[in-house]
Image (cartoon, helix red, strand yellow):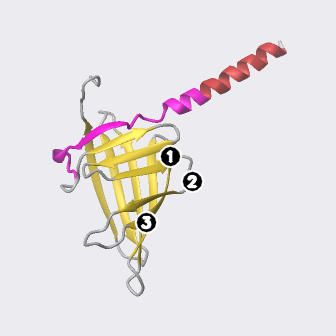
Amino acid sequence: MRTTVFALAIAATALAGLTAAQSKPNLAGAWTPVPEAGTDPRATAITIHLTTAELVIEGASGRKSTYKLDGSPSTNTIPERGGDPPTVAVSTAGWDGNKLVIQTKITRGAPPTLRTIQYRQVYALDADGLLILEESATLGDGGPTDTRKVVYKRKLVMGNW
């Protein structure tokens, strides 16, 4: 009897872990903005690579950002315009239920014009399989928060019918 109870407990634990793992949507793929969904007109196509440990987002310009999904800091650089040195962005990423959340802190400029910006990106799939990205940016000096929403449709490629 004790062996059966123990075996059932192990099976229930494994099933709970499997269910939790399945609740995370598969965001991997090539995505194009859906303009008619009220998407920010500045939005461009993205490609997402996702494993259990890491997220990689590639923009249409070729810029690539890599994030660890264990909540530890990830460092990426953002190229500057006009010959300035790149900006260092420090982010944490992880799952909040079925949403992928990336929090990023960027410090730009030099004293006396040094600015800190806090970014928050939330990626989620809706019931129709569209990728919804909600972004916000807040200046560290208490300035207003700028928000935008982008709706993406997964590109169909050979082998992805």
Mark toward the start of the polypeptide (2 vs 3): 2
In the picture provided, is 44 more to the left or to the right than 104?
left
In the picture provided, is 38 more to the left or to the right than 134?
left
Residue drawn at x 31%, y 68% as measured from the top left: 80
- The answer to whether residue 13 is magenta is no
Find disc 3 in the rendering and name its residue: 88
- The answer to whether residue 27 is magenta is yes
Q: Residues within 10 Å of mark 3 (few under 14, many from 20)?
A: some
Find disc 2 in the rendering and name its residue: 72
Residue 92: x %, y % from top left: 50, 55
Cα distance in 3D space between marks 2 and 3: 16 Å
Amino acid type at mark 2: Ser
Label tally: 3
Along the line of sight, the residue nearer the viewer: 115 or 151 = 115
Amino acid type at mark 1: Asp
Which residues fall within the magenta stretch?
A: 17-39
Q: Residues within 10 Å of mark 1 (few under 14, many from 20)?
A: few
Cα distance in 3D space between marks 1 and 3: 25 Å
Mark toward the start of the polypeptide (2 vs 1): 2
Find disc 1 in the rendering and name its residue: 96
Which structural element holds mark 3? strand
Residue drawn at x 38%, y 78% as measured from the top left: 109
Labelled pair 1, 3 in contact (Cβ < 8 Å): no
Residue 53: x %, y % from top left: 53, 41
Residue drawn at x 45%, y 61% as measured from the top left: 104
Labelled pair 2, 3 in contact (Cβ < 8 Å): no
Amino acid type at mark 3: Val
